[in-house]
Amino acid sequence: MEAWARRLPHPALIFMVLAWGLNFSVIKIAYRDVAPAAVGLTRYVLMAPLLVAWCLAAKQSLKYPPGLFWRLNIAGFVGSGAYMVLFLEGMKTAPAAIGAIALATAPIMATGLSVALKQERFTWRLVLGSLIGFFGVALCVLGGEQRPGGELTGALLVVGSAALWALSIVLYRPLLGKVEPLRTLTLSFPGALVALLPYGWAATAATDWTRVTGKGFGALAYLVVVAGVAAFAAYYRALKDVGPARTSLAQYFVPPTAAVFAVFVLHEKIDWHELVGLAVVICGVATAVWKAPAPISEGTCTDPPQPEGSQSFGASRPQEG
């Protein structure tokens, strides 16, 4: 690794944080013209061929490895399909900043699931970090002025999507030990269609695309190209250059970035309890996953080696907003 890469933030990580941070505000802009269900299916339909083209350009096979067809597509159903349904529905009413903070609990849930499934060893640090992190989310969602019922429901749906994201991390982890990350993502993508097609078909067909504004199309393009393919490309580039630990830690900067963008792009008001809650969530996540114990068993993982004592589980599956 180059000396500058060890001392300075990697450009790919900076881009990834900014792209996924702005993603929460851009989704709100897209919703002004297009229903959430239509956004989800349209994004999928446009991202799928781009992922295939990217995989072919990287000279990675599109054939399923023996015995992995169902495992890959089940992981895709959970991580790119069912997760996206809950996330998009939640973001329909949840403020952008609150949505980002709620989604930040995914690494805690993922680590907890990995312990339950004996992929990681139990640690009291996980228990403490989980309690801190979920207290921070509760402070953000329930603190301050009473929130409308729709906002509370939306925030809870995003927390539910975080749980599905965490489950997908557990499902993807053994697969990433056998298949390259880009190929894993591409081959698992068809499974998402099982969730997204029934969810978004009617809304997509009912959308009058001639009435979608330039901002609406721009938001959709951003969700597909920038927050979708380009941000994943940046993620995998950083994973290669600086390793899983630093790449994973960089994702914790997405919630505060999303909160800042929400203020300037959507003119959302950030209350003191949300700022405190955000800090508490980040502390909880850091407590739960920083210097996590080594996995109980390792596959033939293709990810780059990481520094001893660092945490790599969260980097196995990037957390996109």
Image (cartoon, rainbow, N blue to C red):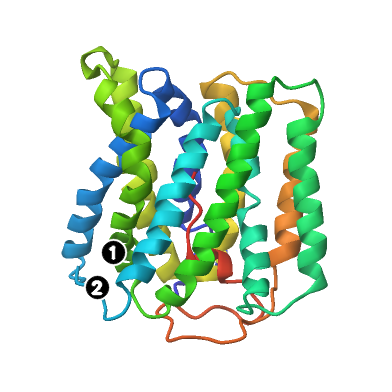
Q: Where is residue 213 in the image (x, y as percent from the top left)?
A: 29, 15
Q: Identify the secondary structure beneath mark 1.
A: helix
Which of 222 and 243 lies nearest the eye of the viewer?
A: 222
The residue located at (49%, 81%) in the rendering is 305
Q: Which mark is residue 112?
A: none
Where 134 sits versus 142, above or below?
below
Where 287 sits versus 105, above or below?
below
The residue located at (51%, 40%) in the rendering is 87
Residue underneath mark 2 = 64
Q: Position of residue 144 (x, y in %)?
A: 82, 25
Q: In this orientation, does residue 12 appear?
A: no
Number of labels in the image equals 2
Amino acid type indicated by mark 2: Tyr
- Rate crowding at label 2 as few (under 14), some (14 to 19) or many (20 or more) other CA atoms within 10 Å: some
Q: Position of residue 211 (x, y in %)?
A: 26, 12
Residue underneath mark 1 = 187
Where 207 sits versus 185, above or below?
above
Which of the two discs, 1 and 2, labels the residue nearer the N terminus? 2
Q: Residue furthest top?
A: 211
Q: Identify the secondary structure beneath mark 2.
A: loop
Measure the alpha-carbon separation of dots 1 and 2.
Answer: 7 Å
Q: Position of residue 66 (x, y in %)?
A: 26, 81
The residue located at (46%, 77%) in the rendering is 174
Q: Quadrant of the N terminus?
A: bottom left
Which of 292 and 164 lies nearest the eye of the viewer?
A: 164
Where 265 sits versus 120, above or below?
above
Which of 49 and 200 lies nearest the eye of the viewer?
A: 200
Circles 1 and 2, Cβ within 8 Å, touching? The answer is yes
- Rate crowding at label 1 as few (under 14), some (14 to 19) or many (20 or more) other CA atoms within 10 Å: many
